[in-house]
Image (cartoon, coloured by chain):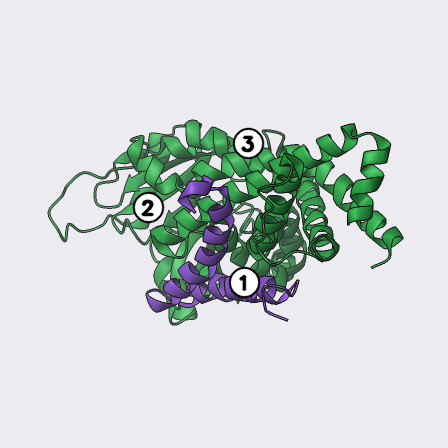
Chain colours: A green, B purple
Amino acid sequence: MKSTTIRRWSQVHTWTSLICTLFLLMLALTGLPLIFHHELEHLLGEAPELRELPAGTPHLSLQQLVDAAERHRPGEVIQYFGFEDDEPNGVVAITAATAGTEPNSSHTFMLDARSGEAVEMPAANGGILMVILRLHVDMFAGLPGKLLLAFMGLLFVVAIISGVVLYAPFMRRLKFAEVRHEKARRTRWLDLHNLIGIVTVTWALVVGVTGVISASADLLISAWRTEALAAMVAPYRDAPALTERAPVNQVLTIAAQATPAMQPDFIAFPGTRFSSEHHYTVFMKGSTHLTAHLWTPVLIDARSLEVTAIGQRPWYMDALSMSQPLHFGDYGGMPMKVLWAVLDVLTIIVLGSGLYLWWVRRRAPANARERAEAAV
Amino acid sequence: MSARQSTFVLPLLIGLLSAAGLFSALLGDGAWDAVAWLGLGIPAVLGLWPLLPRRCQ
């Protein structure tokens, strides 16, 4: 590689890294507890615990649960019901002032499906984990915050790629994983930065790219609304506003009949971001390990309870769905979470050592810098 | 030339194993997860190893 080429890649690496490093350090630090959010919720007592009832206690109807939710939050309406595999007797309810209220102003709690009793979920409504999550997702700045972090993620990806390019000239005279412990501190950290950076590169790229996709979720969801959803509800464009709804009781059965071999994941009520003004939309997920991450929306007319459309999944919604596990590392048991945490800490070390190397190089007198470059 | 002397042979191998692991755990539990633990365990160990105090290495 010519020295001018190296210098150019080096500038790309320096500047993309410098701009994103502080944000990435924040993301890596807040991401660390989030890897274990499930365990931490239980530890902090923020996980919903349902009352012990005799096994086989029958469930209330969905409409009774809607009524229970709206009694629990007077003046609010139900936006979503979610179903969790590890709590078959619970239904996650999300309510807000109106169906179209934005997600951060919603209230999330669990309903005991057998009694209608509401159990609070502080972790979803302003507990310490929620604060960490908001810092990680949008720094409490809404869409601009998410898009800023998405841009920082893109810079991180460019920094990684330029780092891989620069790895070659730096390693020309070194064996893989060789760390010159006997040399100056700067040299030792350069070797560590290169070694840790190159072995974690695949993981860092995957977490970086899926982070960028997740940070763009709002854009992807509005694209889905204007393209896919608008086409599915086109016949309702001039329909009068929904005044009366049929009870929601049967929608899960109706959706299951429309999509055999799929499981319900959540119900979006009429007027919410994931439904139309005239439909209950049941989001079904596949039954295999892989397809359990992918959603198929079933649109059910909220007055007649007829299935009017079964959504095709646009590729970008599949990409968004698949980005969740690949970003969180929650799909391979506890050993995977621990490895995710180790790789996260290693990324912090790569970021920190990169900052250190830039700092000492900047302070080095020009002639020493030339000598160092000549040695490369 | 040994694999350790080549610049990209071992990093490429490690990267491919990581990618295989990241994908594998999406497909199932048990053995599928174990592939991920191996694929991600190698970079985790290789990255931590040189950070240990020298007398431990």
- Amino acid type, mark 2: Val
Where is residue A369 shown, x and y percent of the image? 81, 37
Neighbor class of circle 1 (other Cα within 10 Å; few <14, some 14-19, many 20+) is many
Question: In the picture provided, is A43 more to the left or to the right than A328?
Answer: left
| First in sequence: mark 3 vs mark 2 | 2
Which secondary structure, mark 2? Answer: strand
Q: Is residue B5 visible?
A: yes
Report which quarter residue A311 is drawn in: bottom right
Are labels 3 and 2 on one chain? yes
Dot 1 amino acid type = Ile
Q: Is residue A145 left or right of residue A294?
A: right
A169, A222: nearer the viewer? A169
Task: Name the front one of labels 3 and 2.
Answer: 3
Residues packed near mark 3 inside 10 Å, few (<14), some (14 to 19) or many (20 plus)? some
Q: Which chain is home to disc 1?
A: B
Which numbered circle lies on residue A135?
Answer: 3
- In space, the residues marked 2 and 1 are separated at their CA atoms by 42 Å
Q: For the point 61% across and 49% down, which residue is it?
A: A197
What residue does disc 2 label? A91
Q: Residues within 10 Å of mark 2 (few under 14, many from 20)?
A: many
Three-letter code for the amino acid on which mark 3 is drawn: Leu
The part of the image, by quadrant, that contains residue A95 is top left
What whole-number distance in Å separates the C-alpha atoms at marks 3 and 1? 32 Å
Task: Looking at this view, name the residue that lies furthest to the right.
Answer: A4
Residue situated in front as seen by the camera: A181 or A357: A181
Residue at horizontal 62 percent and vertical 44 percent from the top: A193
**For mark 1, what is the residue?**
B14
> Residue visible at 86% across and 52% down?
A3
Along the horizontal axis of the image, is A127 left or right of A147? left
Chain of the residue displaying label 2: A
